[in-house]
C-alpha cells in the first residue's frame, strides 16, 4: 500500500476538470459584484450513490488484482516451488526479484502521472500489467521466471496507486480523509487474507497456472473498468528533471538492495554468505549518494532534512514498530501452523476470520478518524496486539486454526484501526507544507510499510530459528536411551514401521528419526511461543511509551493561565 495514491484527490477540495469537458463540473457564475460576468466557477462534485459505488467497485477490483499478485507467492511458497521444480531458496529469490523494483517505484510514478496525465498513466499501467501477467504462460526456465517477477513487481506499483484513486475518486471532499481513506487502506489490507481464501481453489485448478489465469482475468476486468470509468485528471505539469531520474536510481538501488537482503538473508543465514554483506554495503552507499544529491538541491525529490526532523523520525519509528508487530500474523501465526503440519486449505477458515476482522475495523475506523480520536485508536490497537500475541503464546503442537480465531481477529482489527489513523495524521501535515513534503512523506510511508514489513518477517524468522536451536538443545539433553519412558517411546515409534520394514535395526533407526522430528516440532512450537510473547511485550512497552508521550504533550501545552484560580475552580 502507498499514500501516493491519495495525493491527487486529498489535497483538492473540489472536483477536477477532466481531460474531456464535463458539463456537470462547470456552471455559469451567479451575478455577483466580485465575479466577472461570463466567468465560470468550479463547484463541488455531488455524485450519485450509483456512480460512487461503481468507482469504489472498480477500485476494489484493481486493488485485489495487484494484491493477489503480491501475496500469492509469499502465501504459497511451498506449493509453488514444487510444480516449478525449485528449492525453497530458489523460490524465495522470486519474491526478492518482485520486491526489488516494487519497494521504491511508486515515488517516481507519482511524478510521471502528474507530467503525462492521469488518464494516460492509468491506461498504460493496466496494459503493462496485463502483458506481464500473460507472459507467465510462456516462461519455462528459472532465469525467465526471475525476469518476469522483476517486471511484475514494477507493473504492480502503479496499479496500487490506481486502486486507491478509484476508491477515493467520487467520495465527497469532506469524507476523503476519513471514510475514503479507510476504505482504500482496508481494501489493500484485505488482499492478504483474500489470497489465502482463494489460493487452495486456484492451486487445485492448474497449480500455479491457475493463479496466473485468474490474474490475467482480473487484469482484463481492470482494463475494462478503467476505460469505462475515467479518473479526473489534474492539470499536467512538467516536474521531472534529469537529476530526479539520477537521484531516483540511487534510491531504487538502496531500497531494492535492502529488500532483497531482508527477503533472502534468513534462508542463507546472515553471516554465512559474503554477497549478503556486499549487497548491504551497496545499499548503504547508494543511499548515501542519494542523500548527498538531495541535500545539495533546491528542488528536492525528497527533503532529507525534513525526513530527519524529530517529528518525522518519531512518526517513522511508530510506523516501524506497528508494522513489525503486524508481522506476527503471517510470519508468526500462519508460519507456526505450517510448522505443525496444517495445510493451506485447512487455514481457509482462519483467513476468513482475518478478512472479517479487517473489514469490521475499517468500518469502525472511518467513524473514529472523522472524530479525530487518533490517540484512542493507537492505544486500542496496542492493547489488541498485546492481547492477541499473548493468547497465541500459549500454543502447542496440537493447536489448529480454530484455536487462533480470536487472536487473529484481534490482530487484523488492530491493523485495520491503526493504519488509516496514522496515515491521516502524517499525510495531513505533509499537505500543509506543499508538494515537496508530500513526496517526502511518501518515502517515509513506503520505507516503513515495505522495508518495515520485510524487516518484521526477517526478525521473526531469525528469532524463531535462534530459539528453536536453543530449545532443541535443551530437549535433546534431557533425552536418554536408558530412560524407561524414552525407551518405551522409541519402541512405540519403531513399531509403526513393522508392517513395511522387517529388519529390527532399520525399524529402530526409523523410530529414532521420527522421535527427532517430533522433538524438533516441539522446539519450533516453543520458539514461536517465545516470538509471540516477545511481540506482546513489545506492544506493552510501546503502549507505555505512548501514554508517557501523551501525558508529556498534554502537560507541555498546559499554561499557567489555563489553570483554575482558587476562587473559581
Image (cartoon, rainbow, N blue to C red):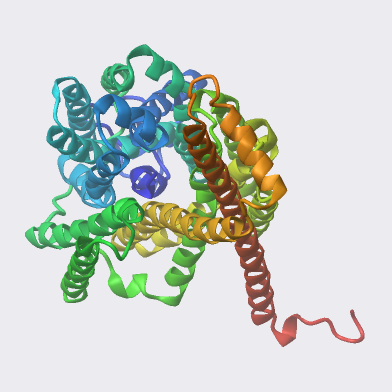
The quarter of the image holding the N terminus is top left
Task: Give the side of residue 489 with respect to residue 161, left or right.
Answer: right
Quadrant position of the C terminus in the picture:
bottom right
User: Could you tell me which residue is drawn at 58 percent across and 38 percent down?
Assistant: 362
Residue 541 lies, with reference to residue 439, above or below; the image says: below
Q: Visible in this render: residue 110?
A: no
For image coordinates 44% across by 28% down, the residue present is: 195
Residue at the far top in the pictured view: 205
Along the viewing direction, whichever of 469 and 505 lies nearer the viewer: 505
State the residue lying farthest toward the right.
567
When asked about the image quadrant of residue 296, the answer is bottom left
**Outermost residue to the left:** 242
**At 41% across and 43% down in the image, what residue appears?**
32
Regarding residue 263, the answer to whether it shows in the image is: yes
The residue at 53%/37% (across/down) is: 508
Lateral position of residue 119 relative to residue 317, left or right? left
Q: Position of residue 319 (x, y in %)?
A: 48, 59
Is residue 119 or residue 32 the one in the foreground? 119
Instruction: From this view, report whether residue 16 is shown above or below residue 441.
Output: above
Q: Quadrant of residue 25?
A: top left
Q: Position of residue 263 (x, y in %)?
A: 33, 51
Percent across and percent down for residue 109 are: 22, 46
Q: Nearer the viewer, residue 542 or 21?
A: 542
Looking at the picture, how far across and down is residue 266, in whole percent? Answer: 36, 55
Amino acid at each position: 500500500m502507498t499514500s501516493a495514491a491519495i495525493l491527487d484527490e486529498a489535497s483538492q477540495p473540489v472536483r477536477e476538470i477532466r481531460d474531456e469537458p464535463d458539463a456537470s463540473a462547470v456552471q455559469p457564475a451567479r451575478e455577483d459584484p466580485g465575479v466577472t460576468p461570463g466567468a465560470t466557477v468550479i463547484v463541488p462534485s455531488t455524485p450519485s450513490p450509483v456512480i460512487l459505488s461503481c468507482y469504489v467497485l472498480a477500485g476494489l477490483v484493481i486493488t485485489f488484482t495487484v494484491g493477489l499478485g503480491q501475496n500469492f507467492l509469499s502465501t504459497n511458497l511451498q506449493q509453488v516451488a514444487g510444480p516449478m521444480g525449485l528449492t525453497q531458496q530458489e523460490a524465495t529469490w522470486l519474491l526478492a526479484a518482485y520486491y526489488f523494483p516494487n519497494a521504491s517505484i511508486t515515488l517516481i510514478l507519482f511524478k510521471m502521472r502528474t507530467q503525462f496525465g492521469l488518464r494516460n498513466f492509468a491506461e498504460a499501467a493496466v496494459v503493462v500489467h496485463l502483458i506481464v501477467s500473460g507472459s507467465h504462460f510462456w516462461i519455462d526456465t528459472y532465469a525467465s521466471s526471475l525476469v518476469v517477477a522483476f517486471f511484475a513487481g514494477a507493473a504492480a506499483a502503479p496499479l496500487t496507486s490506481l486502486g486507491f484513486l478509484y476508491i477515493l475518486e467520487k467520495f465527497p471532499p469532506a469524507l476523503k480523509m476519513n471514510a475514503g481513506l479507510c476504505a482504500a487502506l482496508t481494501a489493500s489490507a484485505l488482499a492478504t487474507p483474500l489470497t489465502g481464501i482463494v489460493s487452495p481453489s486456484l492451486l487445485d485448478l492448474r497449480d500455479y497456472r491457475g493463479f496466473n489465469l485468474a490474474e490475467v482475468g482480473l487484469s482484463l476486468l481492470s482494463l475494462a473498468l478503467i476505460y469505462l470509468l475515467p479518473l479526473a485528471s489534474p492539470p499536467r505539469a512538467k516536474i521531472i528533471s534529469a537529476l530526479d531520474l539520477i537521484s531516483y536510481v540511487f534510491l531504487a538501488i538502496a531500497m531494492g538492495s535492502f529488500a532483497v537482503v531482508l527477503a533472502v538473508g534468513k534462508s542463507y543465514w546472515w553471516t554465512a554468505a559474503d554477497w549478503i554483506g556486499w549487497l548491504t554495503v551497496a545499499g548503504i552507499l547508494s543511499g548515501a549518494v542519494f542523500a548527498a544529491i538531495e541535500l545539495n538541491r533546491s528542488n528536492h525529490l525528497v527533503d532529507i532534512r525534513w525526513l530527519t526532523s524529530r517529528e518525522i523520525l518519531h512518526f517513522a519509528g511508530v510506523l516501524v514498530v506497528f508494522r513489525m508487530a503486524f508481522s506476527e500474523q503471517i510470519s508468526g501465526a500462519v508460519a507456526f501452523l505450517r510448522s505443525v503440519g496444517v495445510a493451506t486449505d485447512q487455514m481457509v477458515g482462519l483467513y476468513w476470520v482475518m478478512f472479517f476482522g479487517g473489514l469490521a475495523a475499517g468500518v469502525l475506523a472511518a467513524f473514529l478518524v472523522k472524530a479525530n480520536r487518533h490517540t484512542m485508536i493507537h492505544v486500542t490497537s496496542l492493547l489488541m496486539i498485546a492481547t492477541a500475541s499473548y493468547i497465541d503464546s500459549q500454543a502447542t503442537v496440537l493447536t489448529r486454526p480454530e484455536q487462533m480465531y480470536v487472536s487473529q481477529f484481534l490482530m487484523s482489527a488492530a491493523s485495520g484501526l491503526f493504519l488509516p489513523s496514522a496515515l491521516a495524521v502524517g499525510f495531513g501535515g505533509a499537505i500543509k507544507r506543499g508538494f515537496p513534503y508530500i513526496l517526502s512523506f511518501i518515502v517515509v510511508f513506503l520505507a516503513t510499510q515495505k522495508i518495515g514489513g520485510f524487516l518484521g518477517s526477517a526478525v521473526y524468522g531469525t528469532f524463531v530459528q535462534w530459539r528453536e536451536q536453543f530449545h532443541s538443545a535443551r530437549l535433546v539433553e534431557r533425552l536418554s536411551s536408558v530412560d524407561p519412558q524414552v525407551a518405551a517411546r522409541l519402541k512405540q515409534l519403531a513399531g509403526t514401521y513393522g508392517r513395511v520394514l522387517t529388519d529390527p535395526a532399520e525399524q529402530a533407526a526409523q523410530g529414532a528419526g521420527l522421535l527427532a522430528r517430533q522433538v524438533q516440532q516441539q522446539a519450533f512450537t516453543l520458539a514461536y511461543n517465545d516470538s509471540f510473547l516477545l511481540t506482546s511485550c513489545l506492544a506493552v512497552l510501546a503502549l507505555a511509551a505512548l501514554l508517557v508521550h501523551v501525558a508529556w504533550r498534554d502537560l507541555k501545552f498546559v499554561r499557567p493561565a489555563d489553570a483554575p484560580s482558587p476562587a473559581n475552580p
